[in-house]
């Protein structure tokens, strides 16, 4: 009985103080090394969604946007709602940076559906939605102004004709 307690304590100690090598590299901002580490993990465990997510994060921080998007996209069939929510969130951020606002907004929304408590997703969703509304309003205002200018030009063109006769 006493031996079991010691084994348990040793196990817990090792568990608490062990850290994923890739996560350690990532935290040290060694994104290239972290990406390679996760790539090696994925060679042996192709279906490891957590490793795929970490690979995508490392790729993103190396500005390898396509690999990041592909990695996050391959997680979307995961049963892990939190991981899937994070993948949608990161895809939304990437697409927002690429000025693909409509798709980005949809991904923020999916992220929030999976994890309604994600304050970053809530904030980014609302900010992007407001920015899109503002851009649409400005675009409509510009079109209205252009139409008014066109009407004024036509009226003046007609007046100039009358003056020439």
Image: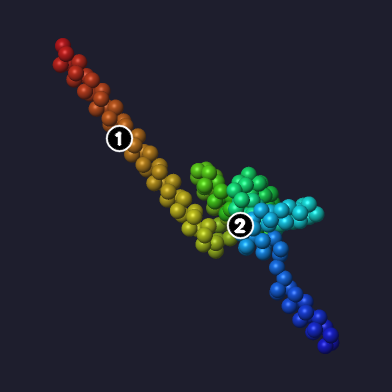
Please, is residue 159 above or below residue 83 in the view? above
Question: Looking at the figure, which quarter contains the C terminus?
Answer: top left
Can you give x and y, in whole percent of width and height, for residue 139 in the image? Answer: 38, 39
Q: From the viewer's perspective, is 47 left or right of 83?
A: right
Can you give x and y, in whole percent of width and height, for residue 103 in the image? Answer: 54, 45
Judge the density around disc 1: few (<14), some (14-19), many (≥20) Cα neighbours within 10 Å.
few
Please, is residue 132 above or below residue 58 in the view? above
Residue appearing at x 28%, y 31% in the figure: 148
Q: For this rendering, which residue is in front, 96 or 21?
A: 21
In the rendered structure, find residue 14 and report the number of the disc placed on it: none
Is residue 76 at all visible to an observer of this figure? Answer: no
Question: Looking at the figure, which quarter contains the N terminus?
Answer: bottom right
Identify the element where label 1 is drawn: helix
Specify the farthest residue to the top: 165
Can you give x and y, in whole percent of width and height, for residue 113 in the image? Answer: 57, 56
Q: Earlier in the sequence, mark 2 or mark 1?
A: 2
Q: Quick check: marks 2 and 1 in contact, CB under 8 Å?
A: no
To which residue does mark 1 refer? 145
Q: Quadrant of residue 20?
A: bottom right
Residue appearing at x 64%, y 58% in the figure: 30
Q: For this rendering, which residue is in front, 118 or 39?
A: 39
To which residue does mark 2 refer? 86
């Amino acid at each position: 009985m006493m031996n079991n307690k010691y084994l348990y304590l040793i196990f817990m100690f090792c568990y608490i103080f062990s850290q994923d090598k890739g996560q350690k590299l990532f935290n040290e901002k060694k994104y290239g090394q972290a990406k390679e580490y996760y790539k090696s993990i994925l060679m042996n465990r192709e279906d490891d969604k957590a490793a795929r997510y970490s690979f995508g994060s490392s790729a993103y921080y190396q500005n390898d946007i396509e690999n990041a998007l592909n990695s996050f996209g391959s997680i979307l069939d995961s049963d892990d709602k939190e991981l899937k929510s994070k993948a949608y969130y990161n895809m939304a951020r990437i697409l927002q940076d690429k000025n693909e606002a409509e798709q980005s907004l949809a991904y923020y929304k999916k992220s929030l559906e999976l994890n309604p408590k994600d304050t970053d997703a809530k904030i980014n969703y609302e900010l992007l939605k407001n920015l899109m509304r503002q851009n649409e309003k400005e675009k409509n205002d510009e079109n209205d102004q252009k139409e008014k200018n066109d009407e004024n030009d036509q009226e003046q063109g007609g007046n100039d004709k009358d003056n020439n006769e």
